[in-house]
């Protein structure tokens, strides 16, 4: 769960084509029929495979957001694997319980 005024970063694992015959491609898309619930606070950094969630607007609070990640071979639209994600942002009256000394950013080392 994310909270207002919180930033979280997640480094994705390296994607490789085990056959070595095509470059892997990662595509981020909204769920079909849920386009209005795609997290606008999500930024994707393809150069270091990092997802960054910056919950900096009160309007995001108390909502659920949905997106999918499609892994496929470059140039082949029909073949791929979809992974579905749901992100929940706490309401404004819910407080974050961060460990002592943690500012809530909870970032991973993404090799910036």
Image (tube, rainbow, N blue to C red):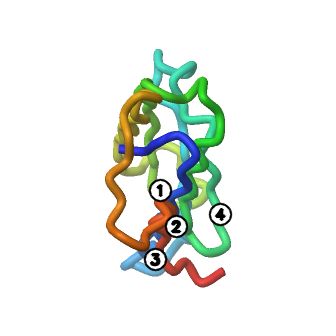
Mark 1 surroundings within 10 Å by alpha-carbon count, few (fewer than 14), some (14 through 19), many (20 or more): many
Q: Marks 4 and 2, how far apart in space?
A: 16 Å
Query: Which residue is identified by label 3?
Result: 14
Disc 4 and disc 3: Cα gap in Å? 13 Å
Label 3 to label 1: alpha-carbon separation: 13 Å
Viewer-side label of 3, 1: 3
Say if mark 3 contacts mark 1, CB within 8 Å. no
User: Quick one: label 4 or label 2, which is nearer the N terminus?
Assistant: 2
Quadrant showing the C terminus:
bottom right
Q: Residue 72's x, y, as percent?
A: 47, 56
Q: Identify residue for label 2.
A: 24
| 55 displayed left or right of 108 | right
Q: Secondary structure at mark 1?
A: strand
Q: Point out which mark residue 45 bears.
A: 4
Corner quadrant of residue 57: top right
Residue at 35 percent across and 47 percent down: it is: 83
Bin the neighbour count of mark 4 within 10 Å (Cα to Cα): few under 14, some 14-19, many 20 and up. Answer: few
Query: Which is closer to the viewer, label 4 or label 3?
Result: 4
Q: Which residue is mark 1?
A: 72
């Amino acid at each position: 769960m994310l909270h207002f005024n919180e930033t979280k970063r997640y480094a994705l694992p390296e994607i490789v084509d085990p056959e070595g015959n095509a470059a892997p491609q990662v595509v981020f898309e909204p769920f079909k029929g849920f386009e209005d619930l795609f997290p606008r606070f999500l930024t994707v950094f393809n150069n270091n495979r990092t997802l960054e969630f910056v919950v900096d607007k009160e309007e995001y609070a108390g909502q659920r957001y949905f997106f999918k990640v499609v892994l496929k071979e470059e140039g082949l639209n029909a073949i791929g694997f979809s992974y579905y994600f749901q992100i929940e942002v706490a309401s404004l009256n819910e407080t974050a319980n961060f460990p002592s000394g943690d500012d809530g950013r909870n970032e991973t080392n993404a090799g910036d």
